[in-house]
Image (spheres, helix red, strand yellow):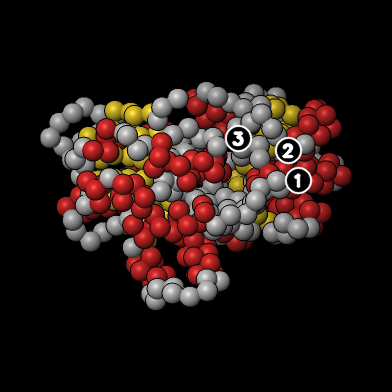
Amino acid sequence: MPPTARFDGPRSEAPRILVLSGYDAASHRRWREQLVAMFSDFEWQSLLLPARFFRWRIRGNPLSWLNEPLLQEHWDLIIATSMVDLATLRGLHPRLANTPSLLYMHENQFAFPVSNGQNASADPQMVNLYSAMSADCVVFNSGWNRDSFLDGVDSFCRKLPDRVPEGLIETLRDKSRVIPVPIEDRLFADRPLLVDRTCPHLLWNHRWECKSLGDNLKLVWASRWEYDKGPAQLLAFLEEIESRGIDYRLCLIGEQFRKCPEEFEIIKRRYAHRLAQFGYVASRDEYIEWLRTADVVLSTALHEFQGIAVLEAVASGCAPLVPNRLSYPELFGEERCYGSFPNDLKREASEAADKLEEIRNSLTKGVDILPDVSHVSASALGSEYRALIESLISGRQP
């Protein structure tokens, strides 16, 4: 299948922006679609590559796009995602070399864990590094993402034998800034409070619908079904709250793939009586409705650069139950997080269960414990995005 070229707006005399998405996963897609919707006064087009064959995508996108006519056209701004080899593209296409460019770092390969069965390689890290050096501005979705990238580059460079340029980290830091992926405004709509807070209804939305089983407290896990989202931690947590006699309902609504960690089959078999839903919700409207009917959003992630699924759930009215690691302390404060012990499953599960009981007690008493995440709404971030885009197009220092 050839690379996808997408025209996203009417042709006009408006500034022309080309978005390059080298691994167009769901969160990357929603981000670029929001940009187009937020700024319809620009002319947008996109080049997209499917979110599969990771190693090939991150190293091969310049080849996949080598004969792409859009790269020969005039653009006022290039916006590339972190999976794009921007440096190579600008070298292969001279017209792009003089076009202002923004690199948006949804993630960075210096802080990306290597799964079992994968061979560690510096290639993805080098793509990130060269792209950041090539871009006029590098935008991260969280401070943790930025800091882990810069720390990772520094550590990487210290291992190199010689000829490492001085001031590299300072140069990268100076051109970096943090602007999160916006959360849709419609998620911040008011929702009715549930009645019975004695039975936690849990949501785990790391990519696997969640229909109401009554007015019980509901816990959601909304991550994608992969090792880096902590399925072993999830299973240990369920074992812990079962041992404590905590009553709850669980929704697993994240995206799943052909090969899933074995913990999910164990959960399906062992905790079928707890499952309000066990499967991916493809409909965006239905997914949002599940968030609005849940009360607690659970994360057990070992890798998370912003936490979009959790932020969407909190905007929809869920209390966060998240570990004290990654971007979560930055988002919610350490006091709202449970203790992080990723290499000690029982201890971390106990910490998470303690925090769940705190949340349940607060909700039972009617205490408002929801953190304010309105600062990451599309309305709140729109002016910051616009100012950055306009400054790059005009040639001003962002």
Q: Position of residue 179 (x, y in %)?
A: 39, 53
On residue 232, the disc is 1
* Image-based side of 35 in relation to 126, left or right: left
- Looking at the image, do the residues carrying marks 1 and 2 touch, with CB atoms under 8 Å apart? yes
Q: Position of residue 110 (x, y in %)?
A: 54, 58
Name which residue type carries label 1.
Ala
Q: Secondary structure at mark 3?
A: loop
Residue marked by disc 2:
261
Q: In terms of depth relative to the viewer, which is nearer, 280 or 62?
A: 62
Q: What separation in Å lies between label 2 and label 3 (alpha carbons)?
A: 13 Å
Foreground tag (2 vs 3): 2
* Image-based side of 89 in relation to 121, left or right: left
Q: Position of residue 183 (x, y in %)?
A: 43, 41
Q: What separation in Å lies between label 1 and label 2 (alpha carbons)?
A: 9 Å
Residue at figure coordinates x 57%, y 50% from the top left: 304
Q: Position of residue 371 (x, y in %)?
A: 53, 50
Whichever of labels 3 and 1 marks the residue nearer the N terminus, that label is: 3
Taking the image as drawn, is residue 178 in sight? no
On residue 189, the disc is none
* Image-based side of 41 in relation to 345, left or right: left
Q: Quadrant of residue 138?
A: bottom left
On residue 207, the disc is 3
Residue at figure coordinates x 68%, y 44% from the top left: 227
Residue at figure coordinates x 60%, y 51% from the top left: 303
Q: In terms of depth relative to the viewer, which is nearer, 139 or 352?
A: 139
* Image-based side of 303 in relation to 57, left or right: right
Name which residue type carries label 2.
Pro
Quadrant (top left/top right/bottom left/bottom right) for the N terminus = top left
Q: What separation in Å lies between label 3 and label 1 (alpha carbons)?
A: 15 Å
